[in-house]
Image: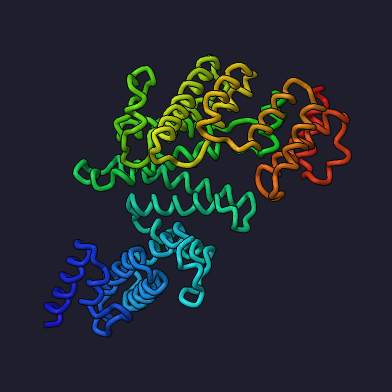
Amino acid sequence: MIQNREKFILDMMDHGLKMKEWQYCLQQLQAENSIPNEYKNSPVLLNKLAFIYMHAARAEEQHAKYIKLAHQTYTIALQKTKNEENHNTIKGMAYLYYSEYIGYNSLLFSNKSSWPLSIDECERNADILYEKIRLHKPDVLDLYRYAHLLYMASNNIHSVQSFSEIMEKRKKAYILYLQAVEKYEHLPEKEKKRLQRIYIKSCYGVCRCGLGLIAKRSSLLNELILLFDFQPKEQGITPFEMKKFSEINHCLTRILQEEGLPADTGDIIDIQTLANREQIIARSWDVYYMIGKFYDYSLQYTRCSDPALLYKKAEKYYTLACEIDCIRRQNQKMISGFKHMYFGLFKLYLRSHQEDAFCKSWDKYYYITNFEDSYRFLFQARWLILKKEYGEAKNVLEQCSEMIKEKNNNVSRKINQLLDIVYIMIEKNSCNIEEKYKPYQRKYFNELLQMQ
């Protein structure tokens, strides 16, 4: 009799999940405002009810209410199961913390009375639970979510964390993304279609996270290398980082294949059609930007036999990404909102001292993309520094500094950094600014002065 009743309730829940009518489903289950007592001795019912609460939290205005009920339901389920039997409950609870951390701007975090946990606590709890799952036969989805959690947490500018903590999260995220990719590729073909989206997302994760780990230079060092062909003595690339290039290349190839996108820009006949295509995961400029970045980083970080070829490939794919984004802006199509593909191309030209190509691209894209004036000033100052016109660069940067109202943003910090570099080149010493920088950064300044 009890089993028949449980089956009846499970069928009702499955119907609700299929129809996606969460409010109606909870009313039918008499679980709209509290957890029915008859469910509290069945981990199976509790897990499914918690899952329904989570869906209701996303679909309804009463987000905090349903998330709180989902959390309570999973908590009861954990108390009712033995350690070896609570794997599904731990997965459910981990996903709750994960999804709320990823969607941190939800009502959850503005209603402390309904949900006492902070963003950082959600991250920590999800990390703890996903680590347990990782040690107990994780599937592709578990690996992807754990990787994505760590990668997002490493980029959270509002969280207080050291550089070493950030790098550790990114290194672990990279390994987990890669494990998700490898696990998917060993699945039987009939199981792959269901997880295709997660596979592509994992491939994107390997590329974004991996390229970020290869580019481990500080913003100051990047500027010095960009402007002075500066090569610090201790810089080099490890065999582990070289291996990443191969892994990233594999994932870029798989993204193109899964999305049905041409791998060679010479095979693209109609960019307009390509720009307006709907992809499974991301718009096509995303992967073409990453391919451009891949060749750009290969040029910067590896000793290749044909740097001119890498330069041409980086330019080609960056340009394609810009063209696609530009077309979508002109056609008022959905865009990412970011302009990284343009800055990637502009810095490539800056690094290779191709001023004519830079000006031609800037003039072509400037009015379509509406670059902020501050970026115009920054690039203008960089070209002046390249030409050793330090006094003019100083004037441009000071003008830009006056224009920026918020003194704490990234642009303001970049202006101050470039002003310090200009000061060193004019005064031929770094005495008056050394207290602003750490010992290893002061060492860069000394090496730079020795080059002059």
User: Would you say 257 lies left or right of 355 here?
Assistant: left
Q: Nearer the viewer, residue 38 or 412?
A: 412
Q: Residue 85 is drawn in which quadrant?
A: bottom left
Q: Position of residue 126 (x, y in %)?
A: 45, 62
Q: Nearer the viewer, residue 415 or 334?
A: 334
User: Would you say 230 lies left or right of 105 here?
Assistant: right
Q: Position of residue 10 (x, y in %)?
A: 18, 71
Relative height, residue 132 to residue 181 (above, below): below
Res. 275 visible in picture: yes
Relative height, residue 131 to residue 308 (above, below): below
Report the residue that reaches farthest toward the bottom.
37
Q: Position of residue 26 (x, y in %)?
A: 25, 74
Res. 240 visible in picture: no
Q: Residue at x 55, y 39 (%)?
A: 213
The mark tally for this picture is: 0
For the C terminus, the image quarter is: top right
User: Would you say 49 lies left or right of 313 here?
Assistant: left
Q: Residue at x 33, y 19 (%)?
A: 269
Relative height, residue 132 to residue 241 (above, below): below
**Colour pattern of the rendering:** rainbow
Q: Residue at x 33, y 49 (%)?
A: 140
For the N terminus, the image quarter is: bottom left
Q: Position of residue 266 (x, y in %)?
A: 37, 17
